[in-house]
Amino acid sequence: MSIISVNTRNQFQGRVVGINRSPVVSEIEVETAAGIINAVVTTSSIERLGLRVGDEAVALFKATEVLIARLGGPGNG
């Protein structure tokens, strides 16, 4: 997977180690070489990406937001 216009200083690749779901927003935990990164994202985003515990992912930082993207597998066109 390639990501366009992303600086390597604001991304951490890792593996999803936890997802705490609720109806509207959910917490996702990504274990990286720098430690575990937690993010609160919409539950629909987790479902749309098909994220599951054990998936490879990348945490992207934009200002005060953290974006999570699934690496490989379904949902990445």
Image (cartoon, grey):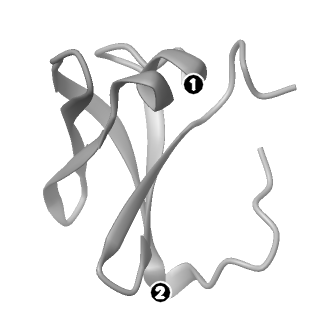
Residue 45 percent location from the top left of the image? 48, 31
Residue 46 vs residue 21: left or right?
right
Provide the secondary structure element on which disc 1 rests.
Answer: helix
What number of labels is visible? Answer: 2
> Which quarter of the picture shows residue 64?
bottom left
In front of the other: 11 or 38: 38
Which residue is outermost to the front? 24
Foreground pick, 15 / 43: 43
**Residue drawn 75% across and 61% down?**
3
Which of the marked residues, 1 or 2, is nearer the chain's N terminus?
Answer: 2
Residue 67, picture quadrant: bottom left
Vertical order, 46 against 9 (above or below): above
Of the numbered discs in the image, which one, if any, rests on residue 70?
Answer: none
Residue linked to disc 1: 49
Give the residue at x 57% y 24%: 49
Q: Position of residue 74 (x, y in %)?
A: 71, 12
Where residue 61 appears, as percent x and y from the top left, is: 41, 74
**On the image, numbered disc 2 is attached to which residue?**
9
Q: Amino acid at mark 1?
A: Leu
Query: Could you tell me residue 32's position as x and y percent?
Result: 26, 52
Q: What residue is rendered at 48% in x and 16% in y?
A: 47
Q: Quadrant of the C terminus?
A: top right
Residue 44 position (above or below residue 52): below
Real-space Cα separation, disc 1 to disc 2, in angstroms: 23 Å
Q: Tell which of 15 and 67 is nearer to you.
A: 67
Looking at the rendered image, the disc whose residue lies closer to the viewer, 1 or 2, is: 1
Left or right of 29, for residue 65: right
- Crowd class of label 1 (few under 14; some 14 to 19; many from 20; radius 10 Å): some
Q: Are marks 1 and 2 in contact (CB under 8 Å)?
A: no
Residue at 69% from the left image edge and 16% from the top image edge: 73
Amino acid residing under circle 2: Arg
Above or below, 60 relative to 72:
below
